[in-house]
Structures are given as structure tokens and as C-alpha cells.
Amino acid sequence: MSKIPRFTPNRFHAFLIALLFLSAIILLVQMFPRQGSFKYPFQVNKPWSYELITAPFNFPIYKDDKQVEREQREILRTFLPYYKKNEQVEAKQQKALSVSLDSALHIPAQYKNYISGQLKFVYKQGIINKESLFYGDSKTIKYNAIQLVDGGQMAHVIPVDSLFTTRTAYEYIINHRPDWLNEEILKSCNINYFLSDNLMYDKTLSERGKQDMLAKVSISQGMVQAGEKIIDRGEIVTPETAQILNSLKKELEKQKGFTDQGDLMWIGEIILIVALMTLLFLYLFLFRYHIYKQTKSVLCLLLLILLLGILSSLTLRFTPFSIYIIPFALLPILTRIFFDSRTALFVHIITVLYVATSLPDSFGFLLLQLTAGMTVVSNLKDLTQRSQLARTALLIFVNYAIVYTGYTLLLEGSWASIDWHMFLYFAINAFLLLFSYGFIWIFEKLFGFLSNVSLIELSNMNSDFMLKFAEIAPGSFQHSMQVSNLAAEATREINGNALLVRVGALYHDLGKMENPLYFTENQLNGVNPLAEMEYQQAAQLIIKHVDDGVRLAKKQNLPQVIIDFIATHHGKGRTKYFYNSFKNKFPGANIDESAFHYHGPAPQTKEQAVLMMADAVEASSRSLSSYSDEIINHLVDDIINGQIADGLLKQAKITFSDVEVVKAVFKEKLKTIYHTRVQYPELNNDEKN
């Protein structure tokens, strides 16, 4: 029976990383920054900056939209709308007239006969709604004729002047009465009640007729033959050339489509993106395994690439803006702050290669962006001040300006070829980089990272919380400062993060604020409340300061990295004073080991290991009766060797060589701190007088 493979944590992590990379590939393919098949942005009356362009096939020269619209408006001036006569209107109104006048006994029959005959005449001529005869945006232009469609669907042109409206029909009937008909009696017959429009606008036929006329307007003028030269590098783009170039662009987009690209192009995009993502994966797996092991770190890098990719795609697809206003240097800035220079430059190269494939001047774009990335990693070694971001943004602007000028002069050999708008784009780009400080804060909150700027803010001794710490537990505060100096110096010597361990050391004994008098450095007059307690109880009160510190740190919203220093600074070590005292007083008694052990966890990083060593050494050094070189050397060796023997450092990523360096630093620093002072001589009595 075959065994079912276990889904171990390592396999789950590998599966999760693979899923992240696959998702990134899918999104990058979907958001590929396509610019269409025609990839040459240009301006009229400016030099052509690209290679020779010849016609790849026969294509028409399309008129511009304004010219086509003007010709369409002109031809529509000759259009005549279509109408149909509604024969039912006359029959209905004649019947209504007969009923009305038959009931009016005072109206003679000859009036009825006259009105009926006149109604027949005007309805035969046609009554039309004059509002339907006006057209144009302002409805001020009037048709001078219409096309009347008869029952056989034949259209006859009828002058508008020969048609009636309800008003002119009424006036015609009144004004053309015989002399023997009385006008007042005729008006009393309410003739206007029996007049209605019988010529109805036929929208369907009219729209069809308009489209037939518009179809006669040609959208092109002339042809360009395959192989014919269009423009060469350095030539000025004239309006006529621009019209041909726009025609070529339109024809290419019609044949290949702006979004519906051919299968081979789509496959090419996939191959390119998979290749780039594979290179990134191999780099992380082979050279930055500590980043690969952290899912949040991989997710952060992929999100940065996606962010710049999506911004590029949106800019190229839906805006008229230049690609050079996008702050691509934001990616190496953030990557350098949270990771390292090599990773920053590698990820930056992957991103700009992805974008460059869709641009006409790919080499120029790569040259500008790669030098910008190099500027970032060369200048932004450690971000400790906000002003460094402003300086970096300024240097990137200068880099863009110099490289662009040199590249353009190299290609064109003329100052006239320089597009001065590019310097505006570079300025906007540099200005947008100033907002990277906000992105630092966002990524810190999203991924739990900690930048040097935040560390410096946390190390501020004048913050309200640190002042409160110094007031409540002054001895513990001074101890933390000494540990901070020791740990930072030692960490620097073994190429660790000295600033991080300095801040971690400042907060490591935070929990002593809860019960400061339980700790000897805060006790006055030698009064120790723990002296009257049982050893197990006293040990538990001392151990509790770690849990209290973690709780206070979370309440203060300290970063998890700092909380980890608090939790690990004693690891799972013993409270040796109380443990040894219990063993000495009750040598044969059974002892509950857990009552005298800290809860851990053990240090996981070299910085946490250095803090543990510095904390124990500094605390023990206060109890020395003398500070000779031999005593200090013995103290440091004894404490750190004891921690190694107890297995407290075995999970930390620190070598024996590093430990020896740390010991040497501690010894040197303690000798400096406790060096023998010169005793100042007193004045003789004679001199005093």
C-alpha cells in the first residue's frame, strides 16, 4: 500500500509561493501595457525620433475626423425628410364636422358644405407639423421640401410652401370664403377643431435615407503603396505626414486590433512574462532564501511589480500622458528600504524590462530607468531622514535630464531634436517620488515591516512613553540604555542591524514598569520586597515582566519586530538567583523546574541573540566588587558560555565566530565604562588658609 505524501509546512509554503507567482503572471498578462501595433508617439512640426518607416502594405490615407464631419454636415444639407399621409385623419375629422354642424340648427347647410369641401382640399394638399420641418443643433434651419411617400412606396418631392399647417389651413378656409358667406358665422363653426396634421414624419425611412447619403462621403483620400517611404529619422513631421502616420496606425489597429491581438503576440507576452517571473523566483530561491521563506516578503515584491505594471498599462491605454511621469524609481526605493540594494536593482530591472517591450524606443526607456535605479541604490543606503527622499528625488531628476540629453544628442546630433516637454515629465516624476514616504508607512502597516525612519522615531528618548518609563522605573531605564549601547556596538561588528537591536534593547525591559520595585536597579535603601517571598513566587514575579512587556508593547502599538525582542530577551532560561538559592536551601527537595524558567521563545535572529547576551552581561556587571580587566573578561566569558551551554542561542542565526566578536566588544566597552578614574589630590591645610 503506497503512502500518502504528507503536506508538510515546507511543501505548503512552496505551494503558496507558486500560487503567488502564478497569480502575478496572470495579472501581468492581462494588464500588459499594450500600445497597439503602432508604437510611435509623435508631434506635428517636431523631428521624427525613430527609424525609417515604410508602408508595410497598401493602405488608404484617411481624412481626419473633423474633415469627415464637415463633409457629412455639408451633404446632409441636401437631405429631405420622408413623410407619409394618414388618410384616416380626414375621414375622422369630416365625420366630427358633420356631427357638430348637424346639431347646430342655426348654422345653414351651405356653411357645412363649404367647410367640408375646404377640409377635403387642405387635407389633400397636406397638413404638417411645422416643428418637424426644422433641423440642426439649434433647430433653426428649416427644410424647404419633403419627400412624400405614397401607397406604392414611391417618394415625391413636395415643396414645403405648398403644404398647410393647422394655422395656415384655418386662415385659408376663412380668407377664401365666397362673399355670400358671413365671416362671423363661419368662425362660429369652430373650424380649427377639425384641423389636424395628416402628414406624419417617417423616422425609419428618414434615418435610412440619411445613412445612405452619409455612406457616400468617403473617409479616405488617396492611397499609400506598399514599400513607399513615409518618414525617416530626423525629418520634420508635417501635417500631411501626420495624416499618413495616423492612417497607418488606424489600419494596423483595424487589422490586428488594439486589444484583440493575434495568438502569436499573446503567446509571446506569456513567454516573456513567465521568463521574467522565473528569473525573479530563482533569484529569491538561490540568493535571497530568507526573503523566499517569508510569504509576506514575496507578496510585497510581487505587489510592487504589479503596481508599476498596472500604472504603466493604464497610462498607455487610457491617458495621453507620457510613460515618463510614472515614478518607476519608487520600486527600488521601497525595496531598498525594506530589503537590500541587490534585490532592489534586480526587481527594478524585471519591472522595466516588462514595460519596455511595449514601447517604441525601448532602449531609451531602459537606459533612463536603469540609471535611475542605480541612482537609488547608490544614494539610499540607509534611510534615516526624510530629507534623504527629497535628495534622492532631486538626483533622479538630474539623472533623467542628463541621460536623456546625452542620448538624444548621440542619436540626432542636434539641440533642436531635444523635446523640452520631457523635462516637465521628469519634474513631475521626481515630485511624485516625494510621496514614497507615505508608501513606506502603508507597506509597514500592511506587511509588518520596519524602516529605519520608524526605528529612529521609536528611539526618541523624549517621547511621552519613554519619559514615563524613565520616571516609573529609572533604574531599568538606565539599564536599557546601557544594554542598547552594548548591543548596537556588538551587532555592528558582526554586520547585523545595529539600529534595530538598539531600539529593541530600549524596550526590552518595558514590563518592569508594572512592578518596578521588584527589580534591584529600581530599589532604594536596599529594601527588596522579594526577600520575604518564597523562591518560586519571587521567580514568577520576575518572569512576569516579560509577559507584561509584551502586553504593554501591544497596547502601545509597537511593531511586532520590537515585541519579539521583548519576548525573547530571556529565552527559556532560568531565573538563576532564585533557582540556585532554592537548590542550596533545599538540596534534597524535588524542584518544579517550570517555576524557575522563562516562557520563551528563544532568540531567532542574531540581533535577538546579541540583546540576550548584552542584557545578562550588563546586569551582572553591576554586581562586581572591582572592575579589573581579568574580572571583566571572566564575567563576559562565563555568562555567554553559560548561555551557550544552556542551549539558549542554538535557534539564533549566529556563528561561534560572531559570538567571539561580541564577547570582545563587550569586554572592551565594559572596561571603558568602568575604567579607573584619577583621584584628585586635596589641598594642604596651609594652602586652604
Image: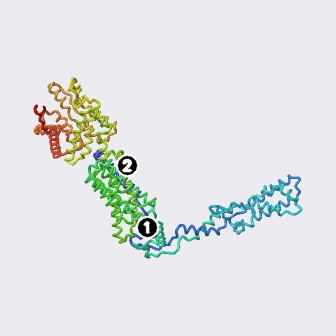
Q: Mark 1 points at which residue?
A: 42
Determine whether 202 is above or below 620 in the image. below
Q: Could you say which quadrant of the image residue 539 lies in? A: top left
Between 591 and 168, which is closer to the camera in this rendering? 168
Determine whether 589 is above or below 163 in the image. above
Local packing at callout 1 (Cα closer than 10 Å; few below 14, some 14-19, many 20+) is: some
Q: Mark 2 points at which residue?
A: 438
- Expressed as whole percent of the image width and height from the top left, the position of residue 321 reads 44, 60
Determine whether 600 is above or below 119 in the image. above
**Disc marking residue 528:** none
Camera-near label (2 vs 1) is 2
Residues at marks 2 and 1 touching, judged by CB atoms closer than 8 Å: no
Determine whether 20 is above or below 594 in the image. below
Inspect this view and state whether residue 12 appears. Answer: no
Callout 1: SS: loop
- Expressed as whole percent of the image width and height from the top left, the position of residue 156 reads 71, 69
In which quadrant is the C terminus drawn? top left
Between 119 and 268, which is closer to the camera in this rendering? 119
Q: Does residue 222 appear to the left or right of 631 in the view shown?
A: right
